[in-house]
Image (cartoon, rainbow, N blue to C red):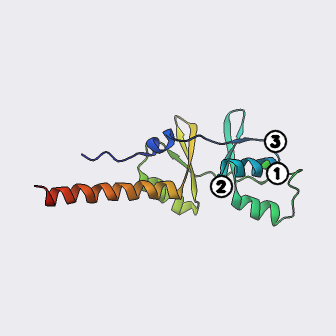
């Protein structure tokens, strides 16, 4: 049996970067740039209340000429969250992202946020699974 990497396996290797409600857009964007992420979950008292993405920056801040220093992240964050459970199958998670037209998904375990995955992460999982399958089939065919 081939053991494929799971969503949980992906998240073990990475930190989760969040901002708190009340953070200015300038602070949020500088933080995102320093961590090289395109989206951050927004937290309030340890609870997930929204997400702020590069797309929110463009559409809700810059396009509306809002102040980077006076606008708080909760004023322009997305509250329609796309969430998957850590034990969900890769295909199911990708389908949720496709249906929601989003490139990021929040991963929860026991109702607690444990990570954020990008479309790229899930596609890499699929690609490595395909490579493993090809290798196994190749060995089966040629190394009897």
Mark in front: 1 vs 3: 1
State the separation of the CA atoms marked 1 and 3.
12 Å
Position of 115 compared to 26: left or right? left
The residue shown at (85%, 51%) is 71
Q: Which residue is mark 2?
A: 38
SS class, disc 3 = loop
Q: Position of residue 45 (x, y in %)?
A: 72, 32
Q: Are marks 2 and 3 in contact (CB under 8 Å)?
A: no
Q: Which residue is mark 3?
A: 22
Q: Earlier in the sequence, mark 2 or mark 3?
A: 3
Residue 140's disc number: none
State the separation of the CA atoms marked 2 and 1.
14 Å
Residue furthest to the bottom in view is 63
Q: Position of residue 7 (x, y in %)?
A: 45, 45
Position of 7 compared to 106: left or right? left
The residue shown at (70%, 40%) is 43
Q: Is residue 3 above or below residue 126?
A: above
SS class, disc 1 = helix
């Amino acid at each position: 049996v081939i053991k494929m990497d799971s969503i949980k396996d992906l998240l073990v290797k990475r930190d989760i970067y969040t901002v708190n409600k009340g953070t200015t857009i300038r602070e949020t964007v500088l933080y995102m740039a320093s961590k090289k992420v395109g989206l951050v979950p927004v937290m309030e008292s340890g609870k997930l209340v929204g997400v702020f993405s590069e797309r929110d920056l463009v559409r809700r801040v810059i396009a509306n000429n809002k102040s980077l220093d006076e606008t708080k992240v909760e004023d322009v964050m997305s509250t329609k969250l796309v969430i998957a459970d850590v034990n969900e199958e890769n295909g199911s998670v990708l389908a949720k992202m496709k249906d929601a037209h989003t490139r990021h998904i929040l991963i929860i375990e026991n109702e607690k946020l444990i990570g954020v995955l990008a479309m790229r992460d899930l596609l890499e999982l699929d690609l490595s699974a395909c490579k493993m399958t090809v290798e196994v089939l190749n060995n089966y065919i040629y190394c009897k």
